[in-house]
Image (cartoon, rainbow, N blue to C red):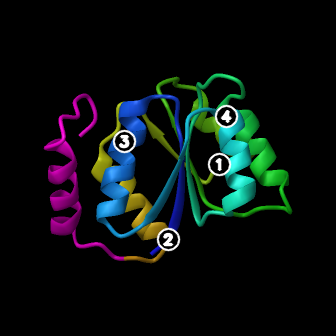
Amino acid sequence: MAKVLVVDDDPSIRQLLSDVLELDGHEVHVAVDGADGVQAYANLRPDFVVLDVMMPRLDGYEVLRRIRTAEESTVPVLLLSAAPDCAARGREIGASYYLAKPFTADEVLYLIDGVLGHETPMADVRAAVDVARGRGYSGYT
């Protein structure tokens, strides 16, 4: 499967996405803020990046700028944010995709698998999400 970097300052989102993506067979790496995300990207060269916009140290826009200037990277980047203007601004900087918070874990998984050419049957997506839900997550399904 793919190497996915999740950059988000919210531990529950990081854990949920890690669990669901790992259950789907992906190798998942996490970063707790923007500065750590830039470093992780440089070290890992992931196949896909899930990136929160509002984070300490460096916001997601700056992380995205740095990713896009790193050897002219074309890695797919999914921006996550609750702010309504993030989609347009992210697109200008080079975001590939955008999901508004709150989002569902199956939306993220289905998007990543579709982009990377891995067709996950919807029943398998649901099973992975159900397992993650069983670990006590709330707010994001």
Membership of 121 in magenta stretch = yes
* Residue 47 image position (x, y, % from top left): 59, 66
- The amino acid on which the numbered mark 1 sits, given as a three-letter code, is Ala
Earlier-in-chain disc, 3 versus 4: 3
Neighbours of disc 3 within 10 Å: few (<14), some (14-19), many (20+): some
Earlier-in-chain disc, 3 versus 1: 3
Residue named by callout 3: 15
Assign a secondary structure to mark 3.
helix
Relative to the observer, which residue lies in front, 140 or 93? 140
Residue named by callout 2: 2
In the image, is residue 81 above or below residue 130?
above
| Pair 3/1: label in front | 3
- The amino acid on which the numbered mark 2 sits, given as a three-letter code, is Ala
Q: CA distance from mark 3 to mark 2?
A: 18 Å
Q: CA distance from mark 1 to mark 2?
A: 19 Å
| Pair 1/4: label in front | 4
Residue named by callout 1: 95
Q: Residue at x 28, y 35 (%)?
A: 140
Q: Which residues are magenta?
A: 119-141
Earlier-in-chain disc, 1 versus 4: 4
- The amino acid on which the numbered mark 3 sits, given as a three-letter code, is Gln
Question: Is residue 101 visible to us here?
Answer: no
Q: Residue at x 16, y 52 (%)?
A: 131
Relative to the observer, which residue lies in front, 121 or 40? 40
Question: Is residue 23 visible to us here?
Answer: yes
Residue named by callout 4: 34
* Residue 39 image position (x, y, % from top left): 73, 46
* Residue 118 image position (x, y, % from top left): 40, 76
